[in-house]
Image (cartoon, helix red, strand yellow):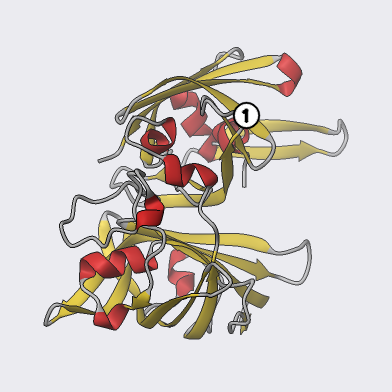
Amino acid sequence: MKRIFIKLFIISILTSCSKDDSSNEVIDERMGDSAITNIYASGKVSEQTAAEAKQTIFGKWDVGGSSSKNNFSSKNSTSCEFNFIEFTDKSYIMNLSIDFGSGGPESGSIFGDYELVEVDGLVTEVRLYFSVLGSNEHIATLTNIEVVEKASGGFDATFDINFLIDLEDINIICSGLDGNYSADKEPAMEETLSAGVDTNHYKVVRSWKLTSYSDSDGYDLASSLLEFCEIETYNSETGEYTYSIDPDCVPPAAFQVNLSTFGTYVTMLVDDSGSPLQVQTGTWAWSNSDQTEFIVDDDWTGTISNLTLSTWEFSSIEEGGDLTASYGLTAIP
C-alpha cells in the first residue's frame, strides 16, 4: 500500500463532522449558518444529555501540549506520550508517540466508535471501542469530563481515562496510560463557521472509501492495495532494491480516508470485516478560497473535479510533473 500512502496522503475513521439532526442540540449564535456541529459547547458531561455531551466533547483535544500526565514507561519502549484525542459526531481518534530510544519516536493511532452511556437521562461515561475482526471491543472508558471556556478564548478539558485492555493486544506498544488528564481544544478550521450545506467544506468533512485509483505508471486500486503485502529486499552488492509479494499475506479489502473540521485526516487500511489493519493520521487544509484545492501535511496537493455528499473525485500531479494520478471515493454512511 506504499503507493497510496505516498501519493494520497504521504506514508505516515473519523466519521462526518456534520451536524446531527437532533432537536436537543444547543444552538450557539457564534456558529452562524454553519451546518457543522457546535464547536463552542462546554460544561460537565455528567450533567448533560447525550445530545448535549456529544457537542461538549466534539473537537481535537491536545493532551500532549498541556500540563497533563503524559509520559509513561513501557516494558518495550522508553516512553509513551499521549498526543491528542479527537471526537467527531460518532467516532474518535487517539494519537500516541512511542519512543524506543533510537531512531526517534514512532506514532501510533487508535480509531473507533464511541458510546455515550446515560443513566436517568444524563451521561455517566464515554466508552471507546476498537474493531477487531468485525467485532467492536470496549477498550477504554472516559469519566469526569468537564469542558470550560476560558475568558481569554478557547476551551480547556479535564477527564479521567481507564483502559480495559493491554494496548499491545492491538499492536500499540504502550502501557500505563490510565489517569487524569487536562487538554486544550485546538481551534477549528477557519472554514467551519461558513460551512453551509452547499459548501465543499461541509461536503468533504466525512468518511470516504477509495473506489478507484489510476496513475500514469499503470497502477490501479487493486495493485496499490497489494503493495501492503510487498517485501522489500536490498542487495548490498548492487545497491538496488527488489520487491516481491509475501504469499502468506492477505491484502487489505479497502482503503478509507476521513477528514475532520479540525484539520485532521485519517487514512486506514481495513480487512474484509471492516476492521483496521493500519491507521495513519496527519493534517489537511484548503489551499484556495474556492475550496477546490487541498493540501496534505503541508506537502501534497489535490485538485477536486467533482464533490457531492456521496462522491469525491480529485487528481494530482506528482514527482515533479512526471506522474499524474486520479482518485474516486464514495462516502461511508
Inspect this view and state whether residue 16 appears: no
Q: In the drawing, does residue 297 fall left or right of residue 108? A: right
Q: Nearer the viewer, residue 27 or 287?
A: 27
Crowdedness of circle 1 by 10 Å Cα count: few (<14), some, many (20+)? many
Look at the picture and state if 64 lies above or below 314.
below
Three-letter residue code for mark 1: Thr
Q: In the drawing, does residue 123 fall left or right of residue 166? A: left
Quadrant where the C terminus sits is top left
- At 35% from the left and 48% from the top, the residue drawn is 36
Please state the horizontal and vertical placement of residue 184, each as a whole percent of the image.
Answer: 55, 71
Name the residue tied to disc 1: 301
- In the picture, residue 230 is in which quadrant? top right
- At 38% from the left and 52% from the top, the residue drawn is 31
Please state the horizontal and vertical placement of residue 193, each as a whole percent of the image.
Answer: 44, 46
- At 67% from the left and 38% from the top, the residue drawn is 232
- In the picture, residue 65 is in which quadrant? bottom right
Q: In the drawing, does residue 237 fall left or right of residue 112? A: right
Under circle 1, the secondary element is strand
**Residue farthest toward the front in the current orientation of the protein:** 29
- In the picture, residue 88 is in which quadrant? bottom left
Please state the horizontal and vertical placement of residue 283, each as a whole percent of the image.
Answer: 58, 47
Inspect this view and state whether residue 214 appears: yes
Q: Nearer the viewer, residue 259 or 235?
A: 259
Look at the picture and state if 187 lies above or below 197.
below
